[in-house]
Amino acid sequence: MLPDLFSIGPVTLHTYGLCIAIGFILGAFITVKLGRKYGMTPQQVMDMGFVMVLWGLIGTRVAYVLMNISYYRYNLLDMFKVWQGGLVFSGGLIAVFLVLGWYIIRYNYSFWQLGDLWAPAGAIGQSIGRIGCFMAGCCYGKPTDRIWGVTFSHPKSLAPLNIPLHPTQLYAAFSGMLIFVILLILHKKKSFNGQVFLWFLILHSTSRLLIERFRGDNRGIIIGSEWTITQVVTIIILISAVTVLFMMKSISEKKKRKPEK
């Protein structure tokens, strides 16, 4: 595809990085609008967004490096070459949880309200970021004979060249956009705090498990099985989110039925 847009001297504008930046800006813009519902100023939203994106990127990269430690232990400097692709969403999600926890303690925010607030941004940001993956050739799919298979030919592409592959990056980009739309609708109809955030985890995890079946890059296979580390983590997140959603929905319904004294 097109890993690099252009170069000026030693400086190169990578398509992957540009997509990440666009995803952040769009996500922040949407969250600023949603933040008014929670009494947050645009400056508060932007400050929080910058910190979450920074640590989210660090978390996604650290998770990827750990999954491929056999390579990076001998290529230490490559750990920092994020423009070459290699990010694991679940690692970023854990990092974002930690950031949210810090904000909750520091500013006495509600975890569930912050989760609802940022969930749509997470979906749209990932969607656009996956387009960057597609342009760079990372997170590529398995070989396929389907008519929608994509053949990478750019010499700097991270995907295998001249072989039709499942466009798993585009699968993820489309699912992220669909999840984004669903979450915006839920925002208008939610009946309790945390509902939007939990549905984000459920929908993303479900789509991730489906798309993972078509991934062709190194996924960190667990010894003695065909499962990848990402699949195991995703299933844990999915089961946890579904369980908590039912619990919170039940609590919410009981509160509504409880007669006022």
Image: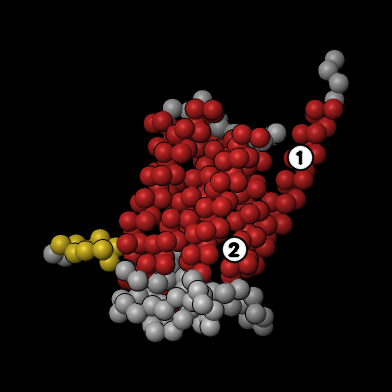
* Residue appearing at x 36%, y 50% in the figure: 22
Say if residue 103 shows up in the picture. Answer: yes
Residue 241 appears at what percent x and percent y? 69, 51
Horizontal side of residue 90 vs 257, given as left or right: left
Residue 39 appears at what percent x and percent y? 51, 25
Disc 2 target residue: 208
**In the rendered image, which quarter is residue 157 located in?**
bottom left
* Residue appearing at x 77%, y 45% in the figure: 246
Disc 1 target residue: 249
Instruction: Tell me the crowding category of disc 1: few under 14, some 14 to 19, or many 20 or more residues within 10 angstroms, Cα based.
Output: some
Which of the two discs, 1 and 2, labels the residue nearer the N terminus?
2
Say what secondary structure mark 2 lies in.
helix
Q: CA distance from mark 1 to mark 2?
A: 24 Å
* Residue appearing at x 49%, y 32% in the figure: 35
Q: Amino acid at mark 2?
A: Arg
Instruction: Tell me the crowding category of disc 2: few under 14, some 14 to 19, or many 20 or more residues within 10 angstroms, Cα based.
Output: many
